[in-house]
Image (cartoon, helix red, strand yellow):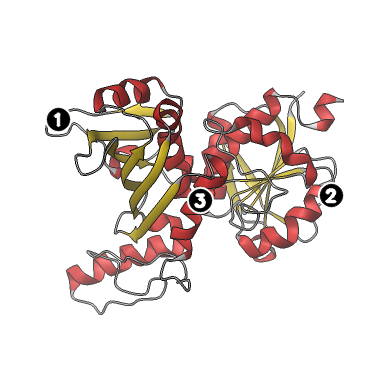
Amino acid sequence: MGLRIAVVGATGNVGREMLAILEERLFPADEVAAVASRRSVGVEVSYGDRTLKCKDLETFDFSGYDLCLMSAGGAVAKEWAPKIGAQGCVVIDNSSAWRMDPRVPLVVPEVNPDAVAGFDKMNIVANPNCSTAQLVVALKPLHDAAKITRVVVSTYQSVSGKGKDAMEELWTQTRAIYVNDPIVKEHFTKQIAFNLIPHIDVFMEDGFTKEEWKMTVETKKILDPKIKLTATCVRVPVFVGHSESVNVEFERPITADEAREILREAPGIMLVDKHEDEGYITPVECVGEFATYVSRVREDPTVENGLAFWCVSDNLRKGAALNAVQIAELMHNRGLFKRLAA
């Protein structure tokens, strides 16, 4: 028997990826419904070779559905996830609304699969921030081997992390530069075309942005609360694919060769690390792929037991939609959906 699944936020970048990945991975679904806000009712989205028409979130009946994949923003998730969960439908939410709630597990299946067992407190499981997801996939096997004490990470985040309108703004500004039109800023604080913006989400009192705070607290919740982490998050003029420059300090010695061997065998990771031209992965090459790519692994001579590496992933996939579907697969494999287990 397959699951009955609703995808909330089906018209957005991540919602569409969720539908594509469900089909690509042959997820056992007997029924898939596309759900969105009232203004998107009737909008058509693709699910494999089928076309689904979006239904209204306000009137949709989630009773009888096993799973809701939600990517509709924090405000919607805060209001609707508990309502949907109360109807017996498990919500896997991609927003930040529930990540740090102690009643809600925050899960990356390659890193902390057993945490999913706590889902039944609210029938909600949280997906981490896109930058956190790829980072902890790369850190987990190294932490198991030598115990991480501190991480310094700088991110290079694509505009798709901010949504379709942000992607359109990059395209519009790029064209404007070539044809000498005025640069119009609507979704970014500064020009994004041919530029970098060291500002993602709102500023907090300590000078860090909320995006940087998310990476810190989510890594602690998913991987180890004792890890110290500091982040600088930067928006770059790339359409899809987040990159990270990572420096890690360990409790025990670990060489670059040892780290490469560990990463080569780790789940969810593709190691592409040759000391030559093109011997590394860039965002363009990761688009549409499932893996988290690690390159440029090297020893950091400025600290004891230090390593540095480069990490790239498709933020719409592992950073969002893929991770949500992997959580669903994990739950299905463990028999956690009540209607099928009955």
Q: Left of 250 or right of it: where is 81?
A: right
- Toward which corner of the image does residue 235 lie, by quadrant? bottom left
SS label for mark 3? loop
Picture coordinates of residue 245 (x, y %)?
29, 46
| Mark positioned earlier in the residue sequence (3 or 1) | 3
- Work out which residue is located at the far right of the displayed protein and give it: 342
In the displayed structure, 76 sits above or below 99; it is below
Front residue of 321/131: it is 131
Q: Mark number for residue 129?
A: 3
Q: Around disc 2, counting alpha carbons within 10 Å, would you say few (fewer than 14), some (14 to 19), or many (20 or more)?
A: some
Q: Amino acid at mark 2?
A: Ala
Of labels 2 and 1, the one closer to you: 1
Q: Name the residue that disc number 2 marks.
A: 86
SS label for mark 2? helix
Q: Amino acid at mark 1?
A: His
Of labels 2 and 3, the one closer to you: 3
Q: Around disc 3, counting alpha carbons within 10 Å, would you say few (fewer than 14), some (14 to 19), or many (20 or more)?
A: many
**Label 2, label 3: how far apart the Cα atoms are:** 25 Å
Q: Around disc 1, counting alpha carbons within 10 Å, would you say few (fewer than 14), some (14 to 19), or many (20 or more)?
A: few
- Toward which corner of the image does residue 2 lie, by quadrant? top right
- Work out which residue is located at the far left of the displayed protein and give it: 277
Quadrant where the image shows the C terminus: top right
SS label for mark 1? loop
Q: Left of 239 or right of it: where is 290?
A: right
Q: Left of 199 or right of it: where is 297?
A: left
| Mark positioned earlier in the residue sequence (2 or 3) | 2
Q: Name the residue that disc number 1 marks.
A: 275
Q: Are marks 3 and 1 in contact (CB under 8 Å)?
A: no
In the displayed structure, 169 sits above or below 181; it is above
Residue at image coords 32%, 34%: 294
